[in-house]
Image: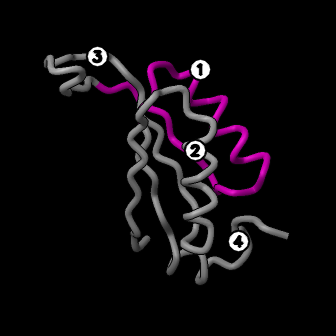
Amino acid sequence: MIGVVLNDKDSAMKNAVFFYVPFSSSEQAMVLCKALLEQRLIGCANIMPIQSVFRWHGSMTTESEVVAIIKTVSSLVLIVKEEIGRRHPYAVPCIAHVTVQV
């Protein structure tokens, strides 16, 4: 079965990957994160409010957003990234990930 290793602390610690994914609302973030949890693709997610500044269609824009820090293991990175891209409501979502040591 595909899924995050939840009972092997050492293995999960050595292979931890955090995704950074902004959304326009906490509801959107929660829907996507719950879907990833239900599929056992992630161990957990944290959803926090942020202020974003970016260029869109040639103009500088400031928006209130939320960011999801989505935690998984390295063996699932490609699947998680694909699933986030498929489900994310933005036309061009930021789906950044980093390997971390915890």
Answer with mark 3 or mark 1, whichever residue precedes in sequence: 1
Regarding mark 1 in the picture, which secondary structure is present there? Answer: helix
Q: Residues in magenta? A: 22-50
Q: CA distance from mark 3 to mark 1?
A: 16 Å
Residue shown at 71%/68% (left/top)? 6
**Label ID, residue 5:** 4
Q: Please, what secondary structure does the residue beneath circle 3 have?
A: strand
Image: 39 above or below 24: below
| Quadrant location of the N terminus in the rendered image | bottom right
Q: Which residue is mark 2?
A: 84
Q: In this rendering, would 70 be left or right of 1?
A: left
Query: Residue at the location (53% across, 22% down)?
Result: 26
Viewer-proximal residue, 71 or 75?
75
Looking at the image, is mark 2 or mark 4 nearer the viewer? 2
The kind of residue tagged 3 is: Glu
The image position of residue 2, as x and y in percent, is 78, 67
Residue 43 in magenta stretch: yes
Q: Residue 39 appears at what percent x and percent y?
A: 78, 51
Packing grade of label 3 (10 A; few <14, some 14-19, many >=20) is few
| Cα gap from disc 1 to disc 2, whole angstroms | 15 Å
Is disc 2 surrounded by few (<14), some (14 to 19) or many (20+) residues within 10 Å? many
Residue 27 is marked as: 1
Please give the residue where the numbered disc 3 appears in the rendered image.
63
**Mark 2 vs mark 3, CA separation in Å:** 21 Å
